[in-house]
Image: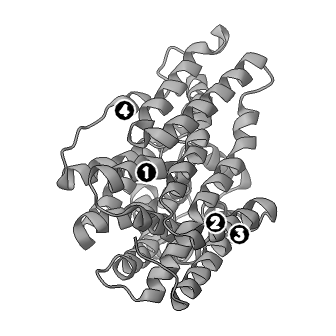
Amino acid sequence: MGQPATERVRLAVVAREWARIGCIGFGGPPAHIALLRELCVERRRWLSAREFEDGIAATNLLPGPASTQLAIYCAWRLRGRLGAVVGGFCFVFPGLIVILGLAVLFLGPHPPRVVEGAAAGAGAAVPAVAVAAAIALIPASWRRTGAARNRRVRWMAYLVLGFAAGATIGPWLVLVLAGCGIVEVAAGPRGERTTSRPSGFAPALIVHASAVGGLGALVWVAFKVGALSYGGGFVIIPLMQQDAVNTYHWMTGGQFLSAVALGQITPGPVVQTVAVVGYAAAGIGGGLLASLVAFGPSFAFVLIGAPHFERLRANTGVQHFLTGAGAAAIGAIAGSAIGLGLELEHLWQAGVLALATAWLLGLHRGVVSALLIAAVLGGVAAWTGAPIGG
């Protein structure tokens, strides 16, 4: 799995196909993976099914948006480093343009009342989306622990610690994720330990580049999102919320909920949410800067690490680290729903949240449809004169 394919695929083809996926990739990582598999394995047969599955397994070991890294990796397999840059850019760019355009509309000084209501409605559903995202991640993480009772007890402890951290100390969540991962490495069976570090990224998790505000603060927040997040796209929410709303006051709690909703209903990776935060902090330039910083590590991880992915997958320290950090991340995603729910300002939003919870957890329907229905309900609420603003 470690070398680019010998078949020469034109860069124009990579650009076209990856941009197409970037335009139609609604539904988050499952949709992205399905589209990449259909293109690279089933239709064009550029990669074998085994090679593609190995790519999924390797990118799941990295911090940051896994489906974006998989898109970069598949392009790397076809055209090396230049192909990875072109493919990754074309995958990310369409969604970035859409979400920045929506940010201008939703976060403008005087958005139309119906638009403001749609944003408030979609935002009201976000806590339910967070809980659904956490629940969906539990089975795979639980299987990773194996059958040993002590490992399962530790897994539950990591889950609880992550939940508490996600609900209370969002900006410092990276320390909890790192701590749980390191504890699991230390607690691993003696025969499975490795003399190498659990991963090249674990030490970086502990480093907090202190920022006093302005663009430095925005860069730090975006860097946390892109380089220090494990366990699925939604773990970025507690990493951003406290900084964006309470520490630097770039946006209100309601606007942050809308930003998360926009990241869910637009094509491309959920990490695009950081562009809305960047726009709130420093306009279009801030949105572009935040995206560059957030997605930059994904390109670096693949461009530098792709030839070594097989060795990374075989590293038992990495596996143990992700068992601990991943469980804590799931807990943090669920815990973030508490802070998100507290940002709701009006009674009608509680009704929308209840409906979204039933839609997602009771009927097991899709996230995008839940958010769109919630947005429609918010628009109707605004049209009928219900309170919208804070």
In whole angstroms, how far apart are the C-alphas of marks 4 and 2? Answer: 37 Å
Residue at 40%, 44% (x, y): give it.
227
Mark 4 residue type: Ala
Give neighbour class at mark 3: few <14, some 14-19, many 20+ (Cα, 10 Å). Answer: some
Mark nearer the N terminus (2 vs 1): 1
Residue at 48%, 79% (x, y): give it.
387
Q: Which mark is residue 348?
A: none
Q: Position of residue 144 (x, y in %)?
A: 71, 33
Q: Which callout, 2 or 1, points to the residue nearer the camera?
A: 2
Which of 62 and 108 lies nearest the eye of the viewer? 108
Question: Split into 4 quadrants, where in the image is the C terminus?
Answer: bottom left
Q: Are marks 2 and 3 in contact (CB under 8 Å)?
A: yes
Residue holding disc 1: 298
Q: Are marks 1 and 4 in contact (CB under 8 Å)?
A: no
Residue at 37%, 65% (x, y): give it.
275
In which quarter of the view is residue 228 placed?
Answer: top left
In which quarter of the view is residue 352 placed?
Answer: bottom right
Question: Split into 4 quadrants, where in the image is the N terminus?
Answer: top right
Answer yes or no: is residue 238 visible. yes
Mark 2 residue type: Leu
Q: Which callout, 3 or 1, points to the residue nearer the camera?
A: 3
In whole angstroms, how far apart are the C-alphas of marks 3 and 1? Answer: 36 Å
